[in-house]
């Protein structure tokens, strides 16, 4: 049998082909295979910075690559060599991503970096920050349940873990778990006839923190378990906090009993950070990692990386790594080069043609394609046109002005109004969300010949 390191060397050979050279040199070159036991493959990274990036960005690709070599599904753990070592010779990174940490490791699921002290407060998150601190101080008495929703990387999990840290410091018993891990452990409890033990474990908590609750959408047995757990905790005045990528009213297959309970407390949306908040986040990250970066460089990153906090952190990480590898100075010119070449590698420089977007939207609503760019203003056509504008902004690199020209020389303000209307309404309108999702599925599964533009905004699914 091959050793873990030999297996990992083979995986690195494949990964080197699958990702860009700068990414491979920065994140994978210094990693090693530590062990492979009981379906779990442990990979050592040189520091926590690299381990976190790999866990957030390449976990699924690494798992798929290893599965192809080993010949079966494999669980992935990234570890960091250090003074506090576990059985595998490394420090386990106990944060949650897809699937959470392995249930084989019974350690806290709270990320030590996700605290209130490390959370940058801005206009988009001021309300939820105050509510989260209140919940941590007096769990079960205000805002119960607390339901936090928003897009990817805006800080939902950070706040969830911050509540956990603060509550533990206040002497409360906390359980923090992803909805996927909750489901997996529930299935395991059924198999092993330990459902009562499973229920008691969660019902004894003074705070139950459930990440990505939308995962239980359509899972009837898990929903039933969550329902009874919710009732037991709520009736005992125990605090429940949940995060989701959308509000409860648009989790389509969520049972009415659960939906009404989720809606009975405080529901707060975290929006992407504004420019000043993005700049403050970058400044805080630079200070945290003791990096001296000119303000003009941080401002450039803040202006260009607009979607979420995770993208900001990734941009800063790439910038610093590029400077270290090349020996270049951290100036405006180098930052612009990184943004153009490293953050958007060649294999992502594809986008959907606006013409194809209009055609797909028109076909979905059963109207001629020409009416999308025409002057017809009946309700159905206007609605289709607004969705087309939203998708052209999300799925292509066209600016608002370019979209306006594409749609019969409409002015910038008209296009912006339509885009913002759909972007806001999609968070609360289940029917609209379903329409947009189905159109996006058609766009993403289309033949490559339809996607002829070469400039580069990455496609972004809801």
Image: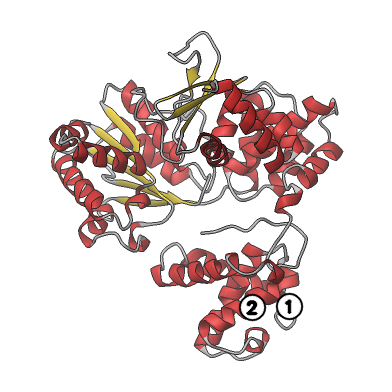
Question: Callout 2: 10 Å neighbours few (<14), some, many (20+)?
Answer: many
Asked whether residue 197 appears in the rendered view, the answer is yes
Give the left or right position of residue 256, taking residue 415 as reference: left
- Tag 1's secondary structure? helix
- The residue positioned 19% from the left and 43% from the top of the image is 229
Percent position of residue 296, x then y: 79, 38
Number of callouts in the render? 2
Observer able to see residue 316: no
Q: Is residue 110 left or right of residue 336?
A: left
- Whole-percent x and y of residue 144? 26, 44
Q: Quadrant of residue 371?
A: bottom right
In the displayed structure, 103 sits above or below 402; it is above
Quick check: marks 2 and 1 in contact, CB under 8 Å?
A: yes
Query: What is the crowding at mark 1: few (fewer than 14 residues within 10 Å), some, or many (at least 20)?
Result: some
Residue that carries the numbered disc 2 in the rendered image = 358
Percent across and percent down for residue 304 are 72, 48
């Amino acid at each position: 049998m091959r050793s873990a390191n030999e297996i990992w060397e083979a995986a690195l050979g494949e990964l080197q082909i699958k990702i860009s050279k700068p990414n491979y040199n920065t994140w994978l070159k210094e990693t090693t295979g530590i062990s492979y036991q009981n379906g779990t493959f442990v990979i050592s990274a040189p520091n926590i910075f690299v381990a976190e990036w790999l866990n957030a960005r390449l976990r699924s690709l690494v798992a798929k690559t290893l599965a192809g070599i080993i010949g079966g599904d494999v669980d992935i753990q990234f570890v960091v060599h250090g003074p506090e070592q576990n059985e595998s010779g490394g420090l386990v990174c106990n944060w949650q991503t897809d699937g959470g940490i392995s249930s084989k490791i019974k350690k806290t699921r709270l990320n030590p970096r996700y605290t209130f002290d490390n959370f940058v407060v801005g206009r988009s998150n001021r309300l939820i920050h105050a509510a989260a601190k209140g919940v941590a101080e007096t769990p079960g008495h205000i805002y119960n349940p607390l339901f936090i929703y928003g897009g990817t990387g805006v800080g939902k999990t950070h706040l969830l873990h911050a509540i956990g840290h603060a509550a533990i410091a206040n002497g409360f018993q906390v359980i923090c778990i992803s909805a996927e891990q909750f489901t997996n452990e529930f299935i395991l409890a059924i198999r092993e006839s330990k459902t009562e033990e499973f229920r008691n474990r969660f019902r004894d908590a003074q705070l139950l923190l459930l990440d990505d609750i939308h995962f239980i959408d359509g899972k009837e047995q898990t929903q039933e378990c969550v329902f009874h757990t919710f009732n037991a905790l709520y009736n005992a005045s125990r605090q429940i906090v949940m995060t989701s990528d959308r509000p409860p009213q648009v989790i389509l297959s969520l049972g009415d009993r659960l939906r009404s309970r989720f809606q009975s407390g405080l529901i707060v949306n975290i929006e992407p950070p504004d420019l000043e908040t993005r700049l403050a986040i970058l400044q805080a990250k630079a200070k945290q990692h003791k990096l001296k970066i000119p303000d003009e460089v941080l401002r450039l990153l803040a202006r260009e990386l607009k979607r979420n906090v995770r993208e900001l952190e990734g941009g800063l990480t790439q910038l610093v790594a590029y400077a270290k590898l090349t020996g270049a100075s951290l100036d405006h010119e180098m930052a612009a080069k990184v943004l153009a070449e490293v953050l958007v590698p060649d294999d992502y420089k594809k986008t959907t043609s606006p013409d194809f977007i209009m055609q797909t939207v028109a076909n979905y609503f059963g109207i001629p394609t020409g009416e999308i760019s025409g002057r017809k203003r009946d309700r159905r056509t206007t609605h289709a046109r607004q969705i087309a504008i939203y998708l052209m902004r999300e799925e292509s690199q066209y600016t608002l002005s370019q979209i306006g020209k594409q749609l019969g020389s409409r002015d910038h303000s008209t296009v912006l109004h339509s885009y913002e209307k759909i972007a806001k309404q999609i968070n609360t309108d289940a029917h609209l969300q379903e329409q947009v999702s189905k159109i996006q599925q058609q766009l993403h599964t289309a033949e490559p010949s339809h996607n002829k533009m070469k400039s580069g905004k990455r496609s972004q699914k809801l």
